[in-house]
Image (cartoon, helix red, strand yellow):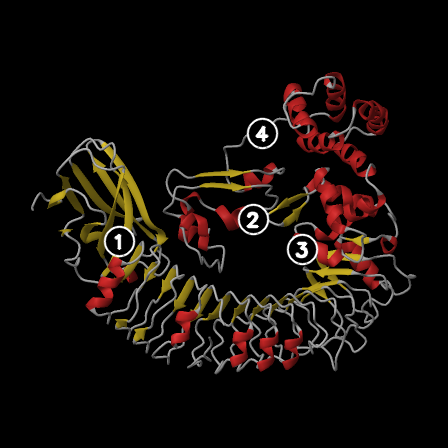
Amino acid sequence: MSQLTNETCTSISHLGVVKDRLKDKKVLVVLDDVDRLVQLEAMAKESSWFGPGSRIIITTQDQKVLKASGINHIHKVCLPSHDEALQMFCMYAFDQKEPKDGFEGLAWKVSDLVGSLPLGLKVMGSYFRGMSEQEWIKALPKLKTHLDRDREIPSILKFSYDALHDEDKSLFLHIACFFDDEPVDIVEGCLAKCFLDVTQGIRVLVEKSLISIEDEMIKMSKLLVQLGRQIVQNESVSEPGKRRFLNDASDIGEVLSDDRAGNSSVIGINLEPDDEITWTSERAFERLSHLQFLRILGKCVEPQSMNYLSQKLRVLIWRNFKITCFPSSFNPKFLVKLEMHSSNLVKFWEGIKPLNNLKWMDLSDSRKLEELPDFSTATNLHDLNLSGCERLVELPSSIGSAVNLHQLNFHNCWCLVKLPSSIGNAVNLRELNLEYCSSLVELPSSIWNIVNLNVLNLAYCSSLVELPSSDLYSLKSYHESSTDIQELDPWIGRISCLQELILSEMNKLVSLPQLPDSLLHLHAEKCESLERLDCAFRNPDISLNFRHCFKLNQEAKDLIIRSGTFGVFPAKEVPQCFTYRSSGSSVTVTLNQMPVGKSTKFNVAVICDIDPFEFGETKQEDITCRVTSGGNAITFNFCPGRRIYPGHLYKYEIEVETEDVASTELVFEFEINYAIAEDEVTWKIRGCGILQLLDGPLLSLRDGDGDF
């Protein structure tokens, strides 16, 4: 979404954002592998959610989904032809569309055996990749025997699975039953002690096309997931407690409810979000002594207390956990990942427990949480997410022992008052998010000991009135919105790596000091008292946002116009420093000689006129600049997908290709692209201006009505 709208901080609070932000845009929407109507309704219920000319493509194995949504343009995708199947097979076996010399007959035989299903061709081509001719000849009889029993696709895929070494087979089943669609680093971390070399095993499965890595996530096709889970189910068809993994809700409920059965072989339980189970026995986990991986995402009715959780747990993920405190017998010694989103936890346990292996801890939206565990042993903790823990008042001083902590998130921790000075010991912390910690009154000076900190977000920390000073600092992004701060400490100018500075709604801020030369983005929206900019913006690519800063003096406005590639500030008319101005929406610039250089840079200014609140807060607009010379035109889009406010000057730097201009005139035409609301009130351009940045032969100007 951020790429479509050219916004770096797009917030997706609900799926309705799609229709709010894309209804004016011509887009291509692809919804792949849809299997439920609710998915379609959430993302593309009506064509009016997208702009005219948009196209929506939906792929599904269930035609009923399409018919139920009223879609009548349905194309049934046929399997590839015999020749196409051979080409697909060869792409994976030889990295080319045809067989290598000497392999023609062998390639035809294998593709004939496999059939035309693309996934089977991909997996089998990867299986034969790199084999010698003799290895192909030796493997063919085994493949033929295997497929003669059952020519269905699972049999084709299982042939590739059966050829794996035992450890790679086990890793395949772990991924199919529990770790599909998980980040690679989390999978490697959670399984590091279960396999000799999990990184190498993942590489083998990728080479065999049994998994893929996309955006650092492990992906396994649905058919391969089904194959893996079927293999596990066949380990014990009638007694699910003797299998390694449980994925079916009825099997999970049966195992947790049966107090009479013997010890279980189960090492993993995965309850999907749409599933539901019920059990009442507090001893439900007593027989699951081998359990290592537990994920409960669906709805469950569990007992009031829960004893006998396995001492071998490595992953514990439980959404909406109802119990307020872990049993005293719980031992997290081997725990690598703990995720208790929206839990009822008030505290964890009494005393200190071993957390040496814990790397990821997510307690987001645990609104009743008041006390965190002792982190003295959590020396390998990487990420700690406490966002939405509304009752959390403080962080224990033992957090200083988490020396490998990378991310710490307190977003919406409204009751958090302070951070312990020991936070300075977490020297590897890279991101600290304190946004909307409205009770936070101070930061310890030790925070500047965190030399690797890149992002510090203090937006909407309304009780924070000052920051500790520092001289050793490397922040890349800094967010501040405290309403009582009148001046920023000069130390901010010494943050040599700072690239983004966000000063949101700092109502009492009067001036800005010198800022670092590295700064690329300055956001000072709604700093209503800001008058002076006691600084220079030396980065030529800086973007400056002073929206709703109504007290800026003229020197500050002139500085914004001269600096960077983008700037916005309140203005009623285009300033005189723009040599060429117009009260209309177009400006014509006349060149006095030809030819000119390859390109010419200009600062352009636009002021819009309309009341945005008439349309609501979610409307988006684009400013378009069309530069015409003779019959040739170049179009520039500014601020696509962002709100344009009336009474503000929007300044942009553009570069126009002038080498092949066919006329001595350049015409700049500005337009606001906006989907007309029901009352059909339209936007208009109040004024525009042009300032040439490079020396050139600009001589005269006339506005859109022909007046000079």
Badge 4 local density, few (<14 within 10 Å), some, or many (20+)?
few
Badge 2 local density, few (<14 within 10 Å), some, or many (20+)?
few
Residue 570 seen in render? no
Q: CA distance from mark 2 to mark 1?
A: 33 Å
Q: Are marks 2 and 1 in contact (CB under 8 Å)?
A: no
Q: CA distance from mark 1 to mark 3?
A: 52 Å
Q: Residue at x 37, y 40 (%)?
A: 52
Image coordinates of residue 591 in percent, x first then y, are 15, 39
Q: CA distance from mark 1 to mark 4?
A: 43 Å
The image quarter in which residue 147 lies:
top right
Q: Secondary structure at mark 4?
A: loop
Select label 2 or label 3 by which is in front.
3
Per the image, the residue denoted by label 1 is 679
Q: Secondary structure at mark 2?
A: helix
Say what amino acid the circle numbered 3 marks. Answer: Asp
* Label 2 or label 1, whichever comes before in sequence order: 2
Select label 1 or label 3 by which is in front.
3
Circle on res. 76? 4
* Label 4 or label 3, whichever comes before in sequence order: 4
Q: Are marks 2 and 3 in contact (CB under 8 Å)?
A: no
The image quarter in which residue 155 lies:
top right
Per the image, the residue denoted by label 3 is 185
Select label 1 or label 4 by which is in front.
4
Image coordinates of residue 429 in percent, x first then y, are 58, 68
